[in-house]
Amino acid sequence: MRSVIEIAARTPELAKSDQIAAAQEIPAKFLEQILSDLRRAGLVSSRRGADGGYVLARPADQISVADIIRAVDGPLAWVRDQRPGAVAYNGNAAPLREVWIAVRAALRSVLDDVTVADVLAGELPPAVTAFTEDEEVWRD
């Protein structure tokens, strides 16, 4: 997320990986792996050479937090290396499947609705900020 935010903040300039790494305190090798995943997913584009760097492949308001997570980590919610709908439990544990489906839906309700542009502007959608208004959510 931080690398994409940093690239978006530097637009229309190309963001060099060493600049991104320094600004966000991300180890260079780890960042290169992330940028590679983001490039394969079509979220960033790169240009090689001394004047090279990274730029968003589409506008920041068209890239969601969920898009980035899926590009780097895969699906938003997995249970035992399966999608929640594919998991089945027996007997008294059977309702757990619905719990995992609800968790995935809750994640989607936030992560699909927040864009890179929202984060960069510091203006999250009201439905998202509503979750943070309850003091209880800030406690472990």
Image (cartoon, grey):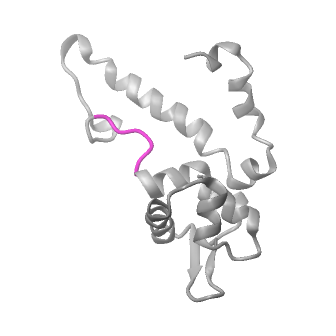
- The residue range painted magenta reads 74-79
State which quadrant residue 47 falls in.
Answer: bottom right
State which quadrant residue 128 falls in.
Answer: top right
Q: Quadrant of the C terminus?
A: top right
| Image location (x, y in percent) of residue 122 | 79, 44
| Image location (x, y in percent) of residue 68 | 54, 55
Extreme residue in the top direction: 92
Instruction: Name the residue located 70 percent from the left edge and 14 percent from the top edge.
Output: 135
In the image, residue 7 sits, relative to residue 12, either above or below, namely: above
Residue 58 seen anywhere in this rendered image of the structure: yes
Residue 62 seen anywhere in this rendered image of the structure: no
- Say which of 112 and 36 sits in front: 36
Instruction: Name the residue located 18 percent from the left edge and 19 percent from the top edge.
Output: 90
- Say which of 28 and 102 sits in front: 28
| Image location (x, y in percent) of residue 38 | 50, 65
- Say which of 49 and 57 sits in front: 49
Q: Was residue 137 drawn as part of the magenta stretch in this picture?
A: no
Q: Along the horizontal axis of the image, is 13 left or right of 89?
A: right
Number of callouts: 0
Q: Main secondary structure of the magenta part?
A: loop
Instruction: Name the residue located 62 percent from the left edge and 84 percent from the top edge.
Output: 52
Q: Along the horizontal axis of the image, is 135 left or right of 43?
A: right
In the image, residue 92 sits, relative to residue 44, either above or below, namely: above
| Image location (x, y in percent) of residue 116 | 68, 54
